[in-house]
């Protein structure tokens, strides 16, 4: 099927999963793919046993999974194929250094930013969808190559 747009969400947790499920439901002309490095989590999204619970989520997933909503562990392929990338990775609280116990630990976001820059073969729209400090997007420019 030819889709108008291809959306990727990196992170299949409590933010990425439900958000992308609703986008897939409301925008059947878009291909929505959710990727995660946790293959067990992806297996659960692809089964009847979802890794998270939200009221009504299982019914939405059942309706759109396989038609325009897909779950995968292929981050690289998803980045190359997509037009729009949502970044919904884990942002735990820092356990060391400046801001420990209070500030978000952005290591997963930073790794994802680097991977997007390495794998993207053209322009992409990047959307931060998670618990991130203001101006985090500006940090992505640190990772680009001159």
Image: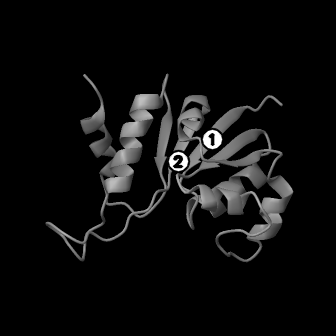
Task: Report whether 47 appears left or right of 123.
Answer: right
Instruction: Assign the N terminus to one quadrant of the image.
Output: top right
Q: Tell me: residue 38, above or below residue 146.
A: below
Which residue position is annotated with label 1? 7
| Alpha carbon separation for disc pair 1 and 2 | 8 Å
Residue 25 sits in quarter: bottom right
* Residue 12 in which image quadrant: bottom right
Between 127 and 17, the residue placed more toward the observer is 17
Front residue of this view, candidates 115 and 25? 115
Badge number at residue 86 = 2
Residue 129 seen from this side: yes
Q: Are marks 1 and 2 in contact (CB under 8 Å)?
A: yes
Q: In the rendered view, does 97 fall on the left or right side of 14?
A: left
Q: Say if 130 sits above or below 1 in the image.
A: below
The spot of residue 6 in percent (x, y) is 66, 36
Horizontally, residue 20 falls left or right of residue 143, namely: right
Q: Dot 2, crowdedness within 10 Å: few (<14), some or many (≥20)?
A: many
Answer whether residue 19 is visible to the viewer in this image.
no
């Amino acid at each position: 099927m030819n889709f108008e747009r291809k959306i990727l969400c990196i992170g299949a947790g409590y933010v990425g999963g439900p958000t992308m499920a609703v986008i897939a439901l409301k925008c059947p002309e878009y291909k929505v793919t959710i990727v995660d490095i946790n293959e067990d989590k992806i297996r659960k999204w692809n089964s009847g046993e979802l890794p998270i619970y939200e009221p009504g989520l299982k019914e939405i997933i059942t309706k759109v999974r396989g038609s325009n909503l897909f779950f995968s562990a292929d981050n690289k392929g998803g980045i190359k194929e997509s037009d729009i990338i949502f970044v919904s990775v884990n942002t735990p609280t820092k356990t060391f250094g400046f801001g420990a116990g209070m500030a978000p630990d952005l290591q997963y976001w930073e790794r994802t930013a680097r991977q997007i820059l390495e794998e993207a073969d053209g322009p992409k729209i990047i959307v931060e969808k998670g618990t991130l400090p203001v101006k985090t997007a500006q940090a992505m420019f640190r990772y680009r190559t001159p």
